Image (tube, rainbow, N blue to C red):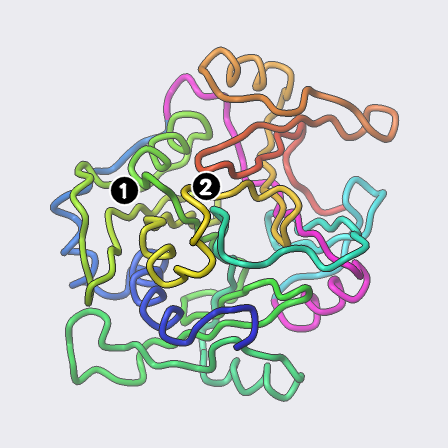
């Protein structure tokens, strides 16, 4: 079983992830709406934007070739300096590492993904390209409660470079569309993203667990930051499905050094943004520094569940 992603784990969890990320299934949405309320971006928060996803890889060139040949994205030069992948509104950046980075499910970042307007056609296209899958094309059209529904909604998990977990799912677009996270407290995590990064969406008003076939799948949250859907699930689901990985662990580990090392969030003025974040009680892990004669100015903070977040000056743009 590649990457340790069990088919049963993927099949069960994705049902709920996609209900949030795409919003196609009214029953799934209605079942959560009673315990959720819309959350607007905090007025005092300096405007933040999703800037990049940063991956560790043993071969950046091969990774860039993989993403740009499989998905709707293109090669580019971040800041005119480093080879990267441009995904319509944000970047995928890469750091070369000597050994394969950890990819096991013990940190807060579960996977990232692209949409597909014609999922069955896209799956066949990927197979012809030689794409490997952790989980094959799977029909979950009955997710909304209609047991007779078929051929409406599909997903599959792609095995990316360095065993990165990438989701393809039925959507009304074919772009980089979502980031799926785990949290020890999805409610608090969602509130953090709303307060400090200005994310918008619906988060639960109750921490009462929601169960599905013996597994805790709630409370869960779905937020938007620019065109990226940030979905947050309870870590209890993960711990129950992988007891061997969690035998000597209690909480989620840092994302630093893993295949998905961190996410990048941009501000117009990174110095002002970091000062405000620090004042608001956010943990600053790396003070601001500059590269390329000041062309790149950035620092790092720690978000919920030890997710590493780069705070960078200047919003993402193709160069």
Residue 281 pos. (x, y %)? 46, 16
Instruction: Give the secondary structure at mark 2.
Output: strand
Identified at 24% across, 55% down, the residue is 216
Q: Position of residue 292 (x, y in %)?
A: 86, 30
Name the image quarter holding residue 98. Answer: bottom right
* Number of numbered tags placed on the structure image: 2
Camera-nearest residue between 241 and 159: 241
Name which quarter of the figure residue 10 lies in.
bottom left
Q: Residue furthest right?
A: 293
Mark 1 surroundings within 10 Å by alpha-carbon count, few (fewer than 14), some (14 through 19), many (20 or more): many
Q: Position of residue 2 (x, y in %)?
A: 56, 74
41 up-or-down from 82: above or below: above
Looking at the image, residue 280 lies above or below residue 71 = above
**Residue topped by disc 1:** 202
Residue bearing the label numbered 2: 225
Mark 2 vs 1: CB contact within 8 A:
no
- In the displayed structure, 261 sits above or below 212; it is above
Please say whether residue 247 is one of the residues in the magenta stretch. no
* Pick the front one: 153 or 301: 301
Tell whether 164 sits left or right of 114: right
Relative depth, front residue between 238 and 159: 238
Q: Which residues are magenta?
A: 42-71
In magenta stretch: residue 64: yes
Q: Of marks 2 and 1, which one's residue comes earlier in the chain?
A: 1
Tell me which residue sits at (56%, 69%) in the image.
Answer: 3
Q: Residue at x 36, y 63 (%)?
A: 241
> Which residue extends farthest left?
34
- Say whether residue 48 is left or right of residue 256: left
Residue, far front: 248
Q: Which mark is residue 71?
A: none
Q: CA distance from mark 2 to mark 1?
A: 12 Å
């Amino acid at each position: 079983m590649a990457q340790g992603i069990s088919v049963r784990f993927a099949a069960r969890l994705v049902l709920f992830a996609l209900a949030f990320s795409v919003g196609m299934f009214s029953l799934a949405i209605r079942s959560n709406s009673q315990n959720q309320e819309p959350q607007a971006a905090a007025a005092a928060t300096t405007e933040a934007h999703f800037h990049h996803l940063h991956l560790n890889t043993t071969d950046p060139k091969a990774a860039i070739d993989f993403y740009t040949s499989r998905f709707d994205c293109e090669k580019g030069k971040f800041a005119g300096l480093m080879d990267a992948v441009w995904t319509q509104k944000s970047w995928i950046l890469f750091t070369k590492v000597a050994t394969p980075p950890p990819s096991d499910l013990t940190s807060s970042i579960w996977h990232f993904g692209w949409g597909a307007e014609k999922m069955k056609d896209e799956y066949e296209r990927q197979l012809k390209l030689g794409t490997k899958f952790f989980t094959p094309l799977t029909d979950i059209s009955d997710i909304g409660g209609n047991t007779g529904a078929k051929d409406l909604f599909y997903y599959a998990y792609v095995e990316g470079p360095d065993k990165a977990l990438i989701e393809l799912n039925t959507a009304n677009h074919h772009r980089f569309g979502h980031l799926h996270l785990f949290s020890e407290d999805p409610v608090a995590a969602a509130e953090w993203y709303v307060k400090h990064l200005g994310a918008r969406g619906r988060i639960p008003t109750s921490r009462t667990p929601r169960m599905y076939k013996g597994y805790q799948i709630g409370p869960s949250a779905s937020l938007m930051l620019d065109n990226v859907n940030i979905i947050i699930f309870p870590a209890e689901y993960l711990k129950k499905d992988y007891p061997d990985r969690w035998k000597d662990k209690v909480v989620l580990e840092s994302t630093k050094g893993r295949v998905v090392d961190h996410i990048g969030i941009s501000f117009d003025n990174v110095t002002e943004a970091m000062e405000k974040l620090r004042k608001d009680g956010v943990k600053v892990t790396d003070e601001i520094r500059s590269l390329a004669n000041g062309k790149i100015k950035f620092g790092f903070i720690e978000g919920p569940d030890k997710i590493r977040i780069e705070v960078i000056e200047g919003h993402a743009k193709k160069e």
